[in-house]
Image (cartoon, helix red, strand yellow):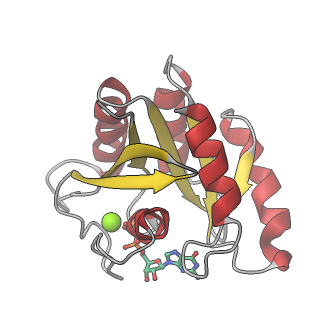
Amino acid sequence: NQPVLAVVGRPNVGKSTLVNRILGRREAVVQDVPGVTRDRVAYDALWNGRRFTVVDTGGWEPGATGLQASVAAQAELAMSTSDAVLLVVDATVGATATDEAVAKVLRRSKRPVILAANKVDDERLLAETASLWSLGLGEPRPVSALHGRSSGDLLDAIVDAL
Ligand code: GDP
Ligand code: MG
């Protein structure tokens, strides 16, 4: 049984794009419409000879429950069913109230949490990354899921944590 990485975060921060980057192929569903990943979907990943399972989350149904409660519930579920959690935050937006609610849940986790500061497409956005230390989850790791910038460094951190 290979270790499981769960990917959590608000809609539209780039979770599915990052999952595709981790897989090295285009498979997870990416859309401009928030909440488009209907369910938790598991994929097999391989990095530096280490196999692991990546679980992409999403599936927020607008109106069913509040966004914040829904994303926090995803994080709870992710914590209980994975070996490590990857929290994805949009560095171009910074930490929102929903990000803070999720971080609060994840800080209680006994499992490792990796904080990805996504959409850092170029150097000018590196400054934005540092503000995410406020989430209390350790070092925010800048990455661009879209362009692949620093994705190797993030994957190194992921397999170290698993
Ligand atoms: P999810 O809802 O968190 O799974 O987010 P998606 O992966 O579906 O992406 C939402 C939107 O953000 C899409 O338009 C992506 O192309 C865009 N996106 C994802 N990663 C990046 C990134 O690194 N940089 C930029 N500029 N856009 C990104
Ligand atoms: Mg998605």
Which residue is more in the foreground, 59 or 54?
Answer: 54
Q: What percent of the width, then of the height, locates residue 122?
A: 77, 80
- Left/right placement of residue 143 relative to residue 10 reads right
Residue at 36% x, 31% y: name it: 82
Q: What percent of the width, then of the height, locates residue 83?
A: 42, 28
Which residue is more in the foreground, 42 or 38?
Answer: 42
Q: What percent of the width, then of the height, locates residue 107?
A: 56, 25
Quarter holding the N terminus is top left
- Left/right placement of residue 35 relative to residue 5 reads left
Tell me if residue 91 can be seen.
Answer: yes
Please determine whether, in this image, residue 40 is positioned above or below residue 114: below
Residue at 29% x, 73% y: name it: 27
Number of numbered tags placed on the structure image = 0
- Left/right placement of residue 3 relative to residue 107 reads left
Looking at this rendering, what residue extends furthest in the front direction? Answer: 49
Residue at 54% x, 80% y: name it: 146
Please determine whether, in this image, residue 108 is positioned above or below residue 150: above
Residue at 54% x, 36% y: name it: 103
Q: What percent of the width, then of the height, locates residue 152?
A: 66, 61
Which residue is more in the foreground, 3 or 108?
Answer: 3
- Left/right placement of residue 22 relative to residue 70 reads right
- On the image, which quarter does residue 90 sit in? bottom right
Tell me if residue 116 can be seen.
Answer: no
